[in-house]
Image (cartoon, rainbow, N blue to C red):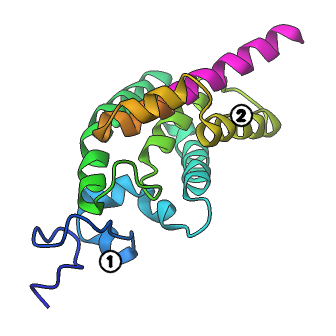
Amino acid sequence: MQNDPTLAGDSTAPRNKPRKASARFMLNHPLHILSLGFGSGLSPIAPGTVGTLFAWASFVVFNPHLTVAEWGALIVVGFIAGCWFTGFTAKKMGTDDPSPVVWDEIVAFWLVLLVVTPATFTGQLWAFIVFRFFDMVKPQPIRYFDRRLKGGFGIMFDDLVAAFFTLLVIALWRMTI
């Protein structure tokens, strides 16, 4: 059992076959827990969407307790640290940007919600829909960054660009009302 190459973190595992994310993999290392969005990335259907929903729910829970400056610090630290630990998890999984890694969606959507707050539930829902559109479709230049930037920084950066475009759409929409 100790030499089982299917166990996460085992350096003897073959590098040519990507590992599947599982609860066992996630619990094998604390950085995997963060990378996989506390389990939200383990969803068999649309893990990025489930990770974004987790971001939304956690924002609603923590927002009454954090100031804008504290949110800002959390997002900056979450981005910088996320570059490291999402890259670590992706490497352990044997792929550049595994879909179960959703920390990038979490941090980026926290940024969106922080900027649009105060917003009604409907406003937050539209922010969610627009963000998911940009994150899933990856129009240019998001696609450019997604394809060119590798490692943890690449994982994190394209979602930050998706957040920027989400905020741009919301700002343009608000200007027309």
The alpha-carbon separation of the residues under discs 1 and 2 comes to 33 Å
Residue that mark 1 sits on: 24
Task: Say which residue appears at 57% left-offset and 29% top-offset.
Answer: 162
Report helix, strand or loop for mark 2: helix
Task: Say which residue appears at 55% left-offset and 46% top-offset.
Answer: 55
Q: Residue 138, image x and y in percent?
A: 59, 34
Of the image marks 1 and 2, the number of the one nearer the N terminus: 1
Relative to 136, say whether 147 is above or below: above
Q: Any mark on residue 130, and which?
A: 2
Q: Residue 81, image x and y in percent?
A: 27, 38
Magenta-colored stretch includes residue 78: no
Q: Report the residue that reaches farthest toward the front.
A: 16
Magenta segment, prevailing SS (helix, strand or loop): helix
What range is drawn magenta here? 161-177
- Going by the image, does 50 lie left or right of 86? right
Say which amino acid is labelled 1. Answer: Arg
Q: Report the residue that reaches farthest toward the bottom.
A: 1
Q: Report the residue that reaches farthest toward the right.
A: 177
- Going by the image, does 174 lie left or right of 41? right
Task: Say which residue appears at 57% left-offset and 21% top-offset.
Answer: 164
